[in-house]
Image: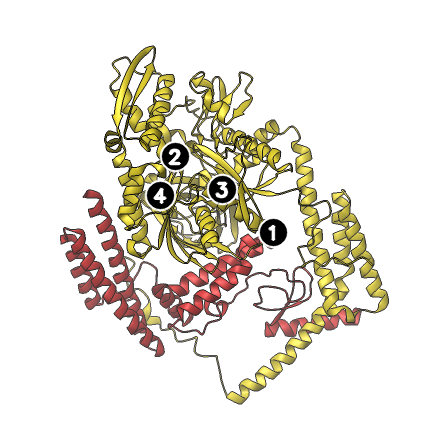
Chain colours: A red, B yellow
Amino acid sequence: MQAKAEGAARSDNAAAEQNIVQACWSCHGPVAVGDPFCSSCKAVQPPGQADHFQRMGLERSFDVDLDALEKAYFRMQRDLHPDRFATKTPKEKSLSQQQATSLNDAYETLKDPLDRAVYLAHLKGLDVLKEGCNALNDPVILMEAMEMREALAEAESADEVSDLTRRAQGDIADCEKELSSAFEGTDMDHIGTLITRLKYLRKLADETRFRRAELRSMA
Amino acid sequence: MALLQIHEPGETPAPHENDADVAVGIDLGTTNSVTAVSVDGKAEVLRDEDGQALVPSVVAYAPDGSPIVGGLAKSLIAMRPDSVVSSIKRLMGRGIEDIKSVAGHLPFTVEPAVEGESGASRMVRLNVDGHKLTPVEISGHILTALKERAEGVLDREVTRAVITVPAYFDDAARTATKDAARLAGLEVLRLVNEPTAAALAYGLDKEAEGLYAVYDLGGGTFDISLLRMEKGVFQVLSTGGDAALGGDDFDHAVAEHFLKDWTGKTPGSGAVKQAVATAREVKEALSADDQGTWTLELDGEEQSFALDRAAFEAMIEPLVKRTIRICEDVLDDADVTPDRVKGVVLVGGSTRVPLVRKMVAGLFGREPLADIDPDEVVAVGAALQAEALTVGSDTLLLDVTPLSLGIETMGGLTEKIIPRNTPIPVAKAQEFTTYQDGQSAMAIHAVQGEREMVDQNRSLARFTLRGIPPMTAGAARIRVTYAVDADGLLTVSAREETTGTEQSIEVKPSYGLSEDEMSQMLYDSMKHAKDDMTMRLLAESRVEAGRAVGAVKAALDIDGDLLGDDDRKAIDAIVAETEAAVAGEDRDAISAAVEKLEEGTRVFAEQRMDRGIRAALRGVEVERLDKAAHGRDQQGEEQAASSDDRPKSAEAGD
């Protein structure tokens, strides 16, 4: 028996190095790393360390097939959402909450082009700060932002504001296209600049929305 | 030969647990409450002998403090206004400051704040004919009555429920609702948002697909939710509302009209209650008729009022307009124009008012759906969800946080950590630092709401992270994590990263009950609280033992060949022992058996790991050969960082 246990410990190390198999917390048998359920006893497993693309079974790329993303998300939430564990043990409830939380995080990040770009850049080693801007002194972005702000401040009707929203949305779509091709290459500076621009444009689109709500409530 | 019963692992039903225990859906409303139960996907509303489904959410207290709930209590309002409480839902999770502005209009006598009282929370307390009661206790009395009524109708014990809350209910109000259920001896399987429950009732019924809006105007709350329904998935896209706007406000508007014309002195609380009761009659009558006359006797003086529908509508139009504006904002939030909405579901008794229907139809450009009784639709959805949670279901509800969750930062500003309309469950972390040299503690203040300034948002909880080791200002790294569970309840934890000093609290809202108060109430309300607790612990042990036995059986099915006859026999014996323990009533025996089971199968588990790892390594070997053949190298691609991308200035952004 002793020899057997040692044998298991040795292969355990080998497997840990490979990071492919771990012990199920419930039946203590082998589970492939990343599997949400134990293949033998079906117990839910911890969410593990997979990145968002791996978790959703997608290729690591800025161009995400949104339908495929959503299908994967719904399919996995169907099995992992806490609603499926309402009568299970506290441990299983807690693991399902962790799994569903990770799924929501992955889905929300990959669904949104800006969040996706920031995340993908992060995976590639570029951290774009939340509020800060990597290229604040980029005069083109600065001018564009100021011009739009001014137009927004001067807009007097909800319709005028809607025009500005449409303009911002058009710019956002263009910027996303540029990001898509930038991510094909390796120019991280360029990617950083585009992300900063996209942030500005998104913020602006939000502001037009607030402004419209404001004008509406004054009407 | 007897057939073996085969269950999915983990779903092995514990002995004694039979279908006598059923989970119900409860719509705990401001004005009325409804209970429903679902069996085989068919939900039915529970009715009394007279066919009445609606139980007025009204509680009358006898001189000895014992509660009477429902129609009888409602009929006592006129006679004994001081000992009857209605619309208590409006005060769930509220503090005294919250209700100051409406104090004159509320048919309650509110206890004055007790300054500096330790241990007691800032929750509102009512003085009902000399009895000091919190909204949680009063709601608990309503839930107890609903539970007993359901048990009578179903002729079974009812201990588990899905309870609905307005989507716009904040953390404090949600916690208060859960606490009320605990007082009533009900386990809350899930808090479900009312509009989501209504959508569930409609979606299943109609197999609807596409975008739907649920407009829910109840007695005291307004909710609007935009959902996408697709192949059994109900995904909430955005939600909004006003937790203090409802049909009651229509009544108050009319009552104000009555009292404004009153020539006498300031009306007492009894007079206000009578005016409000008559106003409600006006609302109901003018929803069907064009005009009418009402006589009101206030403080001994009689006066009659003639009102037509146009006059009534003029009084309530500003209120209805407010709901329409919130609808527009919610559509905007989801970036949806009204014409893309395929259907509008009406929920709540107040949607019977013609002006409401007219204005909703005007916004969405289509007649709203109301073919399920708007008073019952929420309970029906809750019952369906209760069945889904206990028995299983093909449908899935994906809900969101209604309000942003943030933290107070320097200067009394709010920093959002989880924005509104984020799918739940969710966890998000943010790092903060110290601003003084040698700072050893950090106060953390969690708030909920959309405003920039902390004091304009709702304070949820405060706690202090202590034991930060002395460092220069800005050197400590304090990671604050907000986690919201599937009930929409928040847990906050804080951790100093360089030393690992950690503190975590389940947010007990500033306006909630303290744990001490809760225990005392539980003690007072349940004479058999101890038995109840023992039963719950026993049930939990059985679920855990069922899980362990299921896991071992599944392992035996797959890897049983690893065991020699004797080892196999030994394990089978412990499994049988555990099952026997589960059949008994002794919790300690069950726990001991589970422990023995884990111990007795340890070597077997090692053998299984051994086999699994060998198989996996064989797989990797094959993969490696494949990769070598394709000459692919995945390294390198992840290390393209450039140090020039750092922000140049800390003043970035606005």
Q: For residue B391, which numbered disc appears in the image?
A: 1
x and y percentages locating residue B173 in the rendered image: 45, 38
Q: CA distance from mark 4 to mark 1?
A: 32 Å
CA–CA distance in space, label 4 to label 3: 20 Å
Mark 2 = which residue? Answer: B220
Q: Are marks 2 and 3 on the same chain?
A: yes
Residue bearing the label numbered 4: B241
Q: Chain of mark 3?
A: B
Element under label 4? Answer: strand
Location of residue B442 with respect to B512 vertically, above or below:
below
Asked whether the residues under marks 2 and 1 belong to the same chain, the reply is yes
**Residue wearing tag 3:** B379
Nearest to N terminus: mark 4 or mark 3: 4
Foreground tag (2 vs 3): 3
Gap between marks 1 and 3, in whole Å?
18 Å
**Toward the viewer: B141 or B515?**
B141
**Do pointers 1 and 3 mark residues of a single chain?**
yes
Say above or below: B267 vs B351: above
Of all chains, the one bearing label 4 is: B
Tell me the SS state at disc 1.
loop
Of the image marks 2 and 1, the number of the one nearer the N terminus: 2
The mark nearer the N terminus, 1 or 3, is 3
With B85 as the anchor, is A140 left or right in this view?
A: left
